[in-house]
Amino acid sequence: MSRCLLHKSKLDAFKAWLDQEGIPNHPGKGDYQVLQVQVSDWGWRGIYDRLDAKVHYTVEGPMESLVRRFIKATRNQPKETIMSHDSTNPVVAKSATTETPCDGRFDIIWRDGVYHVSKPNVGTCTVVPVTECDRLEAENASLREELIALRDFKRRYDEDFKILHGSVSEAAIRGQITIGVGGLSERLARFDAARKEASKFTKKRTHKLERLEAKREAANG
C-alpha cells in the first residue's frame, strides 16, 4: 500500500484519464477495492476505500506514479474539491454557488488555487473566504488520515519483514540458500523516515493552529 493519495471526488476523472491514456482498468473487487489498474511490470493493482479515511482513497505503491501523473496533468484545469467535515462520504459538487443544495454540512472547498468555506444558508451554500485556521484544520485532517495509513502500512511491512526474515533464516540453517534481507530492511528504513517526516510536519501544523486559535480567543476576549 501507499499513502492516501487520490481524493475521492477525483475517482471518475482519474478513470477517464486512464481511458484517455490507454491504461487498462476495471471496477474493483470486494467491499473496499474501488478500482483495479494494470501497472506496467507490476500487473493489476488496486485503489481502496479505507473506513478511517474520509477524504482520500488509498493506492497501492506501484500505482503512485500514475496518480501523480494524473494530478500533474489536471492541476491547471478548473477544479473544485470538497473536503467534507461529515461522518458520511464526501459530497462531490460540480459548483458551489448560492443555487447549490446544502444539507447542513460544513465543507472546505479548494477551487482555482484558493480555499473557500461553504456554509448552510437557508437551504443553499454560500462561498466565503476561508480563514487561516480553517485552512490549517483542513490540512491537518488530511495529514492525520495519511498518518493513520502510514502506521497501518508500517505494521504490515513489519509483519512481512518478520515472515521473510524467518524464512530466510530457516533456509540458511538448512544450507539450502544464502540470501540477505537488506532490500526489505532499506525499504522499511525509508518508510520509517517518511512516516517520521509526516509526523513532524503534522506537529508543526498543529502548533501553528493552536497559536492562531489562541490569538483569535485573545482578540475575542
Image: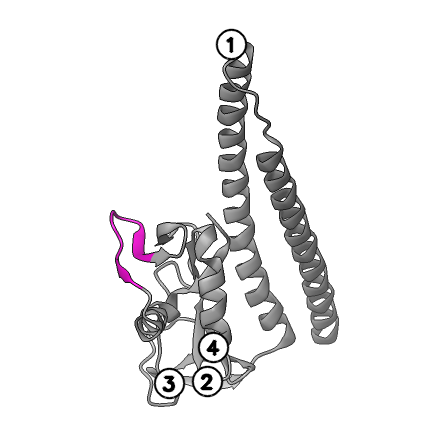
Is-magenta flag for residue 36?
A: yes
Spatial separation of the CA atoms under disc 4 and disc 2:
8 Å
User: Relative to residue 68, is residue 189 drawn left or right?
Assistant: right
Q: Position of residue 138 (x, y in %)?
A: 55, 67
Q: Position of residue 16 (x, y in %)?
A: 31, 73
Give the answer, above or below, for where 211 lies relative to 40: below
In the picture as drawn, the residue positioned furthest to the bottom comes out as 98
Foreground label between 4 and 3: 4
Which one is in front, 180 or 124? Answer: 180
Indicate the secondary structure of the residue bearing disc 4.
helix
Foreground label between 2 and 1: 1
Is residue 85 in view from this perspective?
no
Q: Find disc 3 in the rendering and name its residue.
A: 95
Spatial separation of the CA atoms under disc 3 and disc 1:
65 Å
Q: Which residues are magenta?
A: 24-37
User: Relative to residue 161, is residue 19 drawn left or right?
Assistant: left
Kind of residue at disc 1 = Arg
Q: Find disc 4 in the rendering and name its residue.
A: 73
Spatial separation of the CA atoms under disc 3 and disc 2:
14 Å
Residue in the image at 35% along x and 82% along y:
94
Q: Earlier in the sequence, mark 3 or mark 1?
A: 3
Which one is in front, 9 or 160? Answer: 160
Q: Earlier in the sequence, mark 2 or mark 1?
A: 2
Residue 86 found in image quarter: bottom left
Indicate the secondary structure of the residue bearing disc 3.
loop
Kind of residue at disc 4 = Ala
Foreground label between 3 and 2: 2
Q: Find disc 2 in the rendering and name its residue.
A: 77
Mark drawn on residue 174: 1
Mark 2 touching mark 1, by CB under 8 A? no
